[in-house]
Amino acid sequence: MPPEPDLGTPSEWLRRAQSNLIRAQQPKPEGVYWEDLCFDAQQAAEKAIKALLIFYGIPFRFVHDLTELLTRLEQGGVHLPKDVRSAAALSNYAVEARYPGPTEPVTEEEYQEAVALAEVVVRWVERLVKAELREGE
């Protein structure tokens, strides 16, 4: 059996999530697509969720499917608030929306919603991790 990969620490994953969120929140530069900023929002949520999975020692596959990752958290005994569960919709920005093709262009309103969902997830994970660390002291 191959050795377990070094996944890094929950704090490292959370910092990466925060970095993606900051990029997603920046004013849209000329020539940048809303889709690209939505991808950063999706990545912020994905990395925050993976930080929590690592924090709780819950194994997961390396996928962009937030529904799968959120389900792993639930299976591991983590209660998901409704607004966090709603962030599963960000999975749509992980692959198809990043490339030219049959998907409709993302609107500024959809972008704003994507960032709001990512913010909910990142802030939720930050609160959970900080609360758990305080309890462990």
Image (cartoon, rainbow, N blue to C red):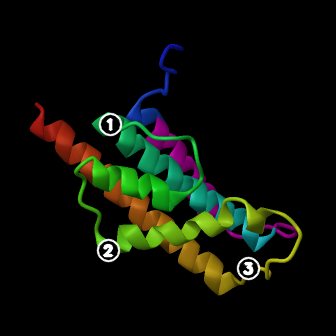
Majority SS type along the magenta span: helix
CA–CA distance between discs 3 and 2? 24 Å
CA–CA distance between discs 1 and 3? 33 Å
Relative side of 117 to 53, left or right: right
Query: Hey, what amino acid is under mark 3?
Result: Val
Q: Residue at x 28, y 68 (%)?
A: 81
| Label 2 neighbour load within 10 Å: few <14, some 14-19, many 20+ | few
In the image, residue 99 lies in the stretch drawn in magenta = no
| Label 1 neighbour load within 10 Å: few <14, some 14-19, many 20+ | some
Tell me the quarter of the picture where residue 123 sits: bottom left
Q: Residue 77, position in %: x, y? A: 22, 51
Identify the image quadrant of the C terminus: top left
Q: Residue 109, position in %: x, y? A: 63, 86
Q: Residue at x 58, y 47 (%)?
A: 63
For label 2, the residue is: 82
CA–CA distance between discs 1 and 2? 21 Å
Query: Hey, what amino acid is under mark 1?
Result: Phe
Q: Nearer the viewer, residue 71 or 105?
A: 71
Q: Which residues are magenta?
A: 13-32
For label 3, the residue is: 106
In the image, residue 16 lies in the stretch drawn in magenta = yes
For label 1, the residue is: 55
Q: Nearer the viewer, residue 17 or 54?
A: 54
Q: How many marks?
A: 3
